[in-house]
Image (cartoon, rainbow, N blue to C red):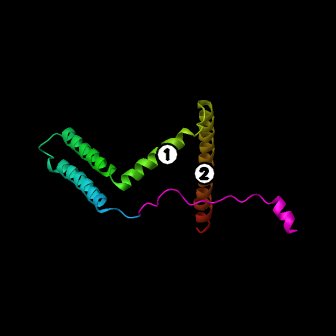
Amino acid sequence: MCEAMTLFAPPLRHIGMNTKAEQPKGLSGADIGKLVLAGLVLVVGVFAYSWFNNVVAASIRLIGVVLALVVALAIGYFTAPGRRVKHFLSESQFELRKVVWPTRDETLKTTGIIIVVVIILSLLLGLIDWLLKTIVFDWLLKLGT
């Protein structure tokens, strides 16, 4: 019986160790400093927007906030979490290339079906609501009088 098992058993594969080096879990001091600086730049941009409320036009203040946001994101990009976000976005973009999107005809047919089902269900719920209102107000409440 033992020989039969070895004849039909699949060959064992060598399971190797992960070749990637394990990444440290915490943030380094430099990363923390960069993230704090990015947060301060963003806070200063928002504060400047409200501080110069009556002095500078709203469009210029909005450009200042957008500029502060871009600078804060640029600072955050050079941190370990920023690199992880970049890696995640590049992987997501790669996965999106593999998606098989529906054709325009399929999309229109599905949308039409959904619209018809929503209309039917809303009419059904309206009918149930009217029926319950009629039962409660016209029959049950009038029975007690």
Left or right of 59, for residue 90: right
In the image, residue 87 sits, relative to residue 101, either above or below, namely: below
The three-letter code of the residue at mark 2 reads Leu
Main secondary structure found in the magenta portion: loop
Residue furthest out toward the top: 105
The spot of residue 99 in percent (x, y) is: 57, 40
Q: To which quarter of the image does residue 102 belong? A: top right
Residue at the image point whose x is 24% and y is 43% from the top: 67
115 is higher (above) or lower (below) than 141? above
Residue that badge 1 annotates:
92
**Is disc 1 placed on a helix, strand or loop?**
helix
Residue 9 colored in magenta in the image? yes
- Residue neighbourhood size for the residue with mark 1, other residues' Cα within 10 Å, grouped as few (<14), some (14–19), many (≥20): few
Quarter of the image with the C terminus is: bottom right
Which residue is denoted by mark 2 in the rendering? 125
Q: Quadrant of the N terminus?
A: bottom right
Identify the element where label 2 is drawn.
helix
70 horizontally vs 114: left or right: left
Binning the other alpha carbons within 10 Å of mark 2 as few (below 14), some (14 to 19) or many (20 upward) gives few
Which segment is the magenta one?
Answer: 1-24
Q: Image quadrant of residue 144? A: bottom right
Amino acid type at circle 1 is Ser
Q: In this view, does 136 lie above or below 70?
A: below
- 142 vs 41, nearest the viewer: 41
Q: Nearer the viewer, residue 117 or 3?
A: 3
> Residue 87: image x %, image y %?
44, 48
